[in-house]
Amino acid sequence: MTTEFVTPTTGASNTSTRDMLSKVIDIEGNPYKRDFPLLANNPQISFLDSAATAQRPKSVLDAQRDFYERLNSNPLRGLYKLSVEATAAVDEVREKVAKFINADSPDDIVFTRNATESLNLMAKSLGGSILKPGDEVVITIMEHHSNLIPWQQVCRQTGAKLVYMYPDKEGFLSDEEIETKIGPKAKIVSVAQVSNVLGVENPVKKIGERAHQQGAYFIVDGAQSAPHMHVDVKDIGCDAFAFSGHKMFSPMGIGVLWARKNILEKMPPMLTGGEMIESVTEDDAVWAELPHKFEAGTQDAAGIVGLGAAVDYINSIGMDRMEAREHALVKYLAEQLSQLDFVRIFGPKDPAQHTAVVAFNVCGIHPHDVASILDASDVCIRAGHHCAMPLMTWMGVHSTCRASVAMYNDKKDIDQLISGLKKVWAVFNGDK
Amino acid sequence: MAINNIYSAALMEHNAHPDYKYQMDNPDYQHEGVNPSCGDDIVLSMDVEDGVIKEIAFTGSGCAVSQSSTDIMSDLLTDKTVDEAYDLCSLFLKMIRGEVTDDKVLAKLGEAAQLKDISHMPARVKCAELGWRTCMTIIDDQIRGKKTA
């Protein structure tokens, strides 16, 4: 008998509510898997790679298909009913997404391909226009390459300096590090809210306060946070927030950038062309109003509609409940892993401090061998550098294994991983 | 594809006790081969006398497949001519990509023929190839001194 604790969803993230919920969440039961066709059709699979990309519920797939079957036409352009409806469908999602991250206006929501494109837009467009030699861009060593290489590039082009904040061994940034590294030369601070490797949640409010004290813009990479916790851009106090749809049950190829209106207004577009102009002459062009200025060419409207359905799906469950379940799952995952004496866990020692991901290594066995052998047990995990090579170097490893959960996982998925890891150990070391 | 076919006792032995994994002193030729996607990284060194590979060794890190494949390769290529070595590397890559499947032809690869089943595991093809590709790069770029297509 499956029971799920039901509670009305509240606005802001609340740790004590989450902790309370996670105590009563039943991770043996799983009322969600049936919503996800890939998981429902493949009950043997333990999918523990949602930090790379999540599965999509049927409602998202239906919404995407429905767009093509019922509304397909180019949004913004046509004066006929279909196009008007397609435009309305896109606008409606913009509003949903604005609410999802508590942004003031849907006009400040820019649809991109993914968090990578959102962050590139900020680096090229904001960074490229304000950075001067001697200025500093501050990031952390735990950034995904998507929030690292764009800044590396723009620093090279402008003569600005890229400064890294380093956490302690468990992945926590100290106040001292934040204050030391974000100094008067800092013009942009860009930080992942949650590390895709260590699973730590960075103190983004504190970092934002420091950045603003020093007159710097504060950008948050929400690729690993938006799928797992209430995001409130006002509460965080950031100037821009980037995330991908595909990590939160949307189709691949749709992402979001939110930024404060006054910043978006002064940023030049990264891509130019159709649908982003007000008027064009032989020699000049006037950009369209926000957000269209940043959405050159035909957008992935069906993907946007899919993103809207993903937000609806999350809201129908409630982020509090999702977060509580994932919290219980990741806690169980980290605890079970730590009981294997041949496994070394990276990141926080406290299982409760991991947000959805646990990186680990099996002593003396390369992560690719681990992942390959786990695959034979139908366990899907990620192995490699996780697009965070500077972090790997800092951690003193070439690569790691990473298991990550979403709310559609259950205890059985994790038990399957643990018994798979015992097999991995046996393949290399015999049944000792 | 049964994973245990890949992680055979022979492969595990090469991984655990590689005979050719050491640093050579002043090798005639040396090249670093990298798999960017997995971080496998080997430095292959070679001494060649009168067109014959007299010594070959490697250092670096990687998965059991890349390490043992390189060790098996080193054993196979020792005392072979550069041309023979190049042809064997080429044959190995064809086997791993599933382009050559005839066991009689593959017998030339000796123990390396046991890695044939990796052709059914696309995710591991690059691991198995790393040493062999690196060897071909040395022959192409450093020994023959020209790049081939």
Image (spheres, coloured by chain):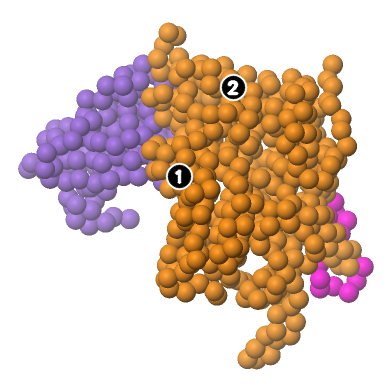
Query: Which element carries disc 2, helix, strand or loop?
Result: helix
The C terminus of chain A is located in which quarter?
A: top left
Left or right, residue A100 beside residue B36: right
Q: Residue furthest right?
A: A81
Would you say residue A72 sits in the magenta stretch? yes
Residue picked out by circle 1:
A391
Q: Residue at 75% x, 42% y: name it.
A: A13
Q: Residue at 46% x, 28% y: name it.
A: A361
Residue B130: x and y in percent read 34, 40
Q: Residue at 83% x, 59% y: name it.
A: A95
Three-letter residue code for mark 2 = Glu
> Between residues A180 and A111, which one lies in front from this camera angle?
A180
**Residue A169 appearing in the image:** yes
| Chain that the image shows in orange | A
Q: Which residues are magenta?
A: A65-81
Residue picked out by circle 2:
A335
Three-letter residue code for mark 1 = Leu
| Chain that the image shows in purple | B
Q: Which mark is residue A137?
A: none
